[in-house]
């Protein structure tokens, strides 16, 4: 992982120490809390080195020691626990076609505060950035004094150029080559430049680290919003593709001469299982698609129309199972509310279309992070620089986000 990549650089001791500091913090961040003995084992370093690194993280306000939780009482004194402290946080944004959620997230993946709002009609990027900043003001209001803002991460339903956060194409926002990272970054000023990620990729990342896919190395997260996308993790690594655009499975050609898709083609998979198709099947008026989740909660028996959506979902998943051989397929977004209603239709299609060998290993499941997978993934993206080098990132952090956003 990162340690292998940095080994060549770490020729001087200071580099090695800062790298180890980030690695220790990463372990604490992912576990939330663990014993110093466990850290020693995971890092392969001696106890005094770990003690020194933990002490430095304490002095930076990123970790604190706690009484042992007592589960690992062996011979001798139990090892002290180390847990994340609130000295650093990130702002995470889940930008959807029909809604906006912003959260303040602390180390350990703790959502400290959240705010939701509508997306401006017409999806003008500058107006969307304005709405994001309005919600950010709400979530930083009661932040602890001296807590450092160390990053901003944004999940976007589109394909993103990783280098500069250019949204190459977000069909359901009607964005083509929109430099959204730059547009939002101008408004954030001292808060720094945001990092953008594809919503489904972030959902997959979060479910892999903290949700239904912990310990699972082959996972697909299906994000069912107005559009449908997939985040794919293969052998523990994100499937990127040549340009980082892999996973646009909603535009898999599915129905010859089918309905017109927002991407311009006909019969894409998302025209059969996306929010518009689900809304039509349950009689949710098009203007209320933003409240589709609530509509679905009120449905107790699947109509033949909804069962057909379920069958289309199952048939597409069968293709994913055959091609990628995942162990877990997580259904996020509206698919989370849809799946319990059409579970049998999905399974029936899997039985017909998925090959036995990969099907036996695959489990279709709901997210472990309920509706917050993308939000958590955006937070993880924003934490990456801190975990790579805590000292450097803290030095460049913003200590008073409230004042910075007010100016
Ligand atoms: Zn399409």
Image (cartoon, rainbow, N blue to C red):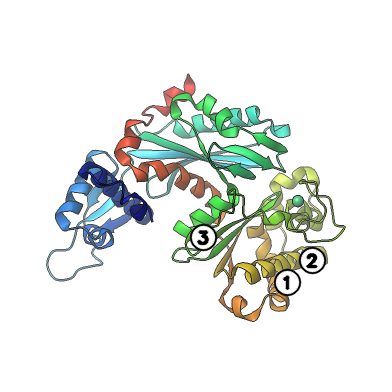
Q: In the rendered view of the protein, which quadrant contains the N terminus?
A: bottom left
Element on which disc 1 rests = helix
Element on which disc 2 rests = helix
Single out the residue that lies furthest toward the top: 407
Residue at image location 77% in from the left, 56% down from the top: 268
In primary-sequence order, the first of circles 1 and 2 is 2
At which x and y percent is residue 283?
A: 81, 54
Give the residue number, with chain letter if any, for mark 1: 345
Residue 369 seen in render: no
Element on which disc 3 rests = loop
Task: Give neighbour class at mark 1: few <14, some 14-19, many 20+ (Cα, 10 Å).
Answer: many
Evaluate if marks 1 and 2 touch, with contact meaning CB atoms under 8 Å apart. Answer: yes
Q: Rounded to the nearest whole Å, what is the CA distance between mark 1 and mark 2?
A: 8 Å
Single out the residue that lies furthest toward the bottom: 356
Residue at image location 70% in from the left, 70% down from the top: 346
Evaluate if marks 3 and 2 touch, with contact meaning CB atoms under 8 Å apart. Answer: no
The part of the image, by quadrant, that contains residue 47 is: bottom left
Give the residue number, with chain letter if any, for mark 3: 368
In primary-sequence order, the first of circles 3 and 1 is 1
At which x and y percent is residue 16?
A: 25, 47
Task: Give neighbour class at mark 3: few <14, some 14-19, many 20+ (Cα, 10 Å).
Answer: some
């Amino acid at each position: 992982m990162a340690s292998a990549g940095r080994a060549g650089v770490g020729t001087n001791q200071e580099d090695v120490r800062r790298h180890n500091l980030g690695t220790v913090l990463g372990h604490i961040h992912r576990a939330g809390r663990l014993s110093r003995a466990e850290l020693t084992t995971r890092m392969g370093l001696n106890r005094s080195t770990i003690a020194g690194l933990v002490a430095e993280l304490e002095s930076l306000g990123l970790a604190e020691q706690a009484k042992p939780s007592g589960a690992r009482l062996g011979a001798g004194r139990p090892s002290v626990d180390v847990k994340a402290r609130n000295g650093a946080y990130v702002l995470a944004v889940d930008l959807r076609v029909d809604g906006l959620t912003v959260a303040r997230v602390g180390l350990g993946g703790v959502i400290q505060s959240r705010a939701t709002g509508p997306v401006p009609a017409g999806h003008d990027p500058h107006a969307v950035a304005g709405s994001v900043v309005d919600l950010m003001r709400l979530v930083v209001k009661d932040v602890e004094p001296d807590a450092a803002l160390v990053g901003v991460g944004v999940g976007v339903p589109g394909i993103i150029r990783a280098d500069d956060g250019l949204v190459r194409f977000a069909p359901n926002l009607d964005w083509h080559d929109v430099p959204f990272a730059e547009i939002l970054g101008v408004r954030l000023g001292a808060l720094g430049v945001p990092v953008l990620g594809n919503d489904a990729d972030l959902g997959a990342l979060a479910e892999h680290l903290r949700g239904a896919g912990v310990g699972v190395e082959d996972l697909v997260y299906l994000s069912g919003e107005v559009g449908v996308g997939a985040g794919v993790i293969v052998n523990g690594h994100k499937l990127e593709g040549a340009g980082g655009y892999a996973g646009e499975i909603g535009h898999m050609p599915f129905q010859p001469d089918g309905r017109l898709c927002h991407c311009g083609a006909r019969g894409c998979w998302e025209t059969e299982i996306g929010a518009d198709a689900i809304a039509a099947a349950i009689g949710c008026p098009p203007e209320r698609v933003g409240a589709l989740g609530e509509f679905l909660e009120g449905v107790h028996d699947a109509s033949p129309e909804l069962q057909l959506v379920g069958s289309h979902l199952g048939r597409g998943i069968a293709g994913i199972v055959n091609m990628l051989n995942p162990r877990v397929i997580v259904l996020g977004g509206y698919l989370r509310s849809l799946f319990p209603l059409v579970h049998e239709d999905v399974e029936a299609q899997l039985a017909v279309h998925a090959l036995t060998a990969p099907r036996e290993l695959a489990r279709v499941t709901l997210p472990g992070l309920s509706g917050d997978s993308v939000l958590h993934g955006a937070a993880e993206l924003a934490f990456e620089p801190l975990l790579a080098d805590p000292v450097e990132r803290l030095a460049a952090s913003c200590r008073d986000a409230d004042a910075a956003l007010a100016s």
